[in-house]
Amino acid sequence: MTPLELIPSHQVAQWLLRNIHHLLDIIGLEKQKTTEEIIYVAIIVAASIFIGQFVSTIIRLGVRKIVMVRNPDLGHQLVERRVLVRCCRIIPPLVILALLPFAFTGNSLLNTILIRTLLVYTSIVVCMAICSVASFVWMRFDQKRNTRNLPIRGVLDTILGILWVITVIICVSIIVDKSPAVLLTGLGAFAAVLMLVFKDSILGLVAGLQFSQNDILRVGDWIVVPSTIANGIVIDVTLTTVKVQNWDNTIVTLPPYSLISGAMQNWRGMTESGHRQIARTIKFELYSIKSVDDKWIDTMTAMFPILKPYVDNMRKQGGEYHTFDPSNTAVNGTLDTNMGLFRAYMCEWLLANPNITKDEQILVRLMAPDEYGIPLQIWCYTSIPNWTVYEAVQSAMFEHIIVTAPLFGLNVYNESSAVDTTTVSLVDHRGTDPKPLPQQPTPPAA
């Protein structure tokens, strides 16, 4: 059965054709077959557009009224995304297809061309309507059910791509008047070419499934891709691209599969935990680390009362535990050197800081020395992961270290410059040789 045989007979078409004959008699035009066909086609096109607009208006008003009463949010979204408008566009070509065959007698070439054109147009309009409904369903699901912000946009893009491929095959089959099965059989020879053309889409689909299945990436995640300039928030994940908005508001697009095959750092765990790590070192000059006595410790305890509980506890233990308190692993330090007491002070200072998380690791430790001195590392977590607060807490911490360390007799390493070794000479008025001014001792060169 051909598409033309599927179109039903219609008494309205017969009535319309008789009135066209009568109209030509009144006007006095000669009854020509071509003239009647042209007038008939013009009338049914105008009528179909009117009927389509009328039915579309009735449907939209009825559906909108029902939906607005039961679910106003859904109704507003239907209107904004023009779903009903796209679906109602199917009506005019269907009306034309129902009435057009009666304008022609026999096997007319013009009739065949118009019918095939209308069938192609109808296929495209139907595909657009289905895609609009699918996009609307995906949007509602993404808003209401996708609480984990999984990147399911790639699945939608795949469905839309399949729909359009099927539509193109149907349109070609209508134009060449062949069965779609024949075209699909012929496409097997071009499978390798199609795989090459749609390589990115296929890899994107695979990556999207892995993103969702393994929960690797979500919209809203902060990611860093070392091999690229991407360092920001994921704003969209499609079948072929991942859009990342960097901190300078630039947009970086990446192929989804590159995030699976390469390295990617996702900061979601940090944001969900509510803590952000501080792990930074500051270097001290080795010669400034010295042994201390009880009098010096008492002076520092009076200057920094926060040290008193630690010092008293360490002195009570005495003996082999004079340099470590195993009962308090949060505070590590010694009473033997100024660096040991400074480490204990920094641990106590971090524990007393309200911006530092107490239920995470807090560590102040010395690392392996090098030619620039001995590094002191601060390892802790801020209680607020916000970037601005994090940087403010970290900056305030190291400012405090730089100011406080000299009070413990510790020198922060700084490469020697002309300011550190300036010699000023004076000339004797009686013509004697210039004599250098006395200088303060300077640290040995690194």
Image (spheres, rainbow, N blue to C red):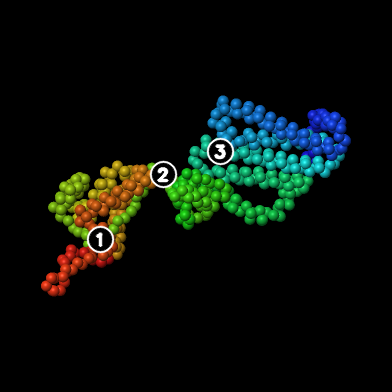
Residue in view at x 63 percent, y 46 percent: 161
Where is mark 3, residue-wise?
139
User: Marks 1/2: CA distance?
Assistant: 37 Å
Quarter of the figure with residue 306: top left
Residue 388 coordinates in the image, percent (x, y): 37, 46
Q: Which mark is in front, 2 or 3?
A: 3
**Residue 36: assigned label:** none
**Residue 271: assigned label:** 2
Vertical position of residue 114 compared to residue 15: above or below = below
Q: Quadrant of the C terminus?
A: bottom left
Residue in view at x 77 percent, y 34 percent: 43
Towards the viewer: 11 or 21? 21
Residue in view at x 73 percent, y 47 percent: 172
Reading the chain from its start, which is encountered first: label 2 or label 3?
A: 3
Residue 344 coordinates in the image, percent (x, y): 24, 50
As shown in the figure, which amino acid type bears the numbered disc 1? Glu
Vertical position of residue 203 compared to residue 58: above or below = below
Where is mark 1, residue-wise?
285
- Asked if residue 36 shows in the view, the reply is yes
Towards the viewer: 85 or 413? 85
Quarter of the figure with residue 376: bottom left
Q: Quadrant of the N terminus?
A: top right
- Asked if residue 260 shows in the view, the reply is no
User: Marks 2/3: CA distance?
Assistant: 26 Å
